[in-house]
Amino acid sequence: MLEKLLQLTGWDKPEKKDVALVLSSGGARGLAHIGAIEILEAQGYHITSLAGCSMGALIGGVYASGKLNEFREWMKGIDRKKMLELTDFSLSLNHFVKGDRIIEAIMEFVPDVAIEDLPIPYCAVATDWLTGREVVFRTGSLFEAIRASISLPLFYKPVHRDGMILIDGGVVNPIPLNRVVRNKGDILVGVDVSGYDFKAQDELKHELTERRKRDRSFTTMLLNKLIPDNLDFNYYTMLSRTSSLMISQNAKLMEQLMPPDILVDIKMSRYSTFDYDKSEKLIAYGRQKTLKTIDKYTQRSKRRKKSKKIED
């Protein structure tokens, strides 16, 4: 009765802003997750649980450890030279990079902990290459879970554990909305950076090609003669785009099966899987996209409340 009276006088019941946050795979594009988290916190949302895949597992784990600011500052120092220093190349037939050096570097300022000892519930998703099954880490070493979840096939060395060969979780569940711990009345928020804006990407490449053709300098004219127009259409780009399309479609399927209350869909055209030297630009892009999405969600919520008041 009192609440009804307060509503009639214009009082709004405070909206619960606890968030179950899910962060997708996406390589370097996953740095946009940092911007998303910053906006959620700035808007008064309280992250009470986390689930992540691949880069989302890394960002989520660092956040749950309370070291996101330190990680962001460290990323500012990552340039092409530093990336090369952190790349421990391997002569193996099934991977190019061991992946130990990067984890050891992060562990210098983010100590390894047991997942169950983190202040908020957290899980990371990997894939068992032998069976194709999804493997969800809810206990044990945080960095073992992260290392398994980021094991990009062919690139990073797979993690061998309990008879399994663990690779990137994005292969089976790139945005694990069904794995995050839920609390009554919380808001399910998914941040998806797994998709590319292929149309915009192709238009950008076409524009650059045309600009190169119009350049009348001797060096550029020579390159135009030597470089075929279809250079970008090769075995690597075919495999890369096919993989990206499959991961993106799997993410869309999960979003349909488990619709989040808020979906921050961050498709990119200018940034690739390995653009780790562009962290601040990616973080800013994540902030921008998340702020727009939150604004739309807030406006929808206000309209629903207004409609409910009229009906009452």
Image (spheres, helix red, strand yellow):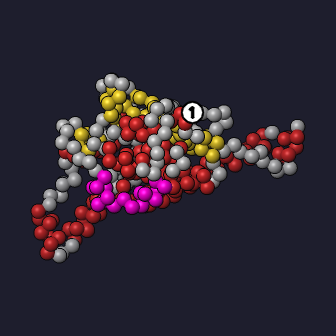
Q: Is residue 187 left or right of residue 154?
A: right
Q: Where does the image place residue 167, in percent across and percent down from the top left?
A: 33, 34
Decide whether residue 275 is among the magenta residues: no
Residue in the image at 36% along x and 55% along y? 276
Query: x, y percentage for residue 95?
Result: 24, 40
Asked whether residue 255 appears in the rendered view, the answer is no
Can residue 82 be seen here?
yes
Overall secondary structure of the magenta section: helix
Residue 10 location, x and y as percent? 82, 50
Q: Which residue is mark 1?
A: 181
Q: Is 302 on the left or on the right of 127, as rendered?
A: right
What amino acid does circle 1 point to? Val
Of residues 303 and 46, which is closer to you in this image?
Answer: 46
User: What residue is at 54 percent from the left and 50 percent from the top?
Assistant: 37
Residue 85 covered by magenta stretch: yes
Q: Magenta region: which residues?
A: 70-86
Residue 107 x/y as whole percent: 42, 47
Locate the C terminus and report the quarter of the image it occupies.
Answer: top right
Above or below: residue 93 compared with residue 110: above
Q: Quadrant of the N terminus?
A: top right
* Residue 281 sits above or below residue 133 on the image: below
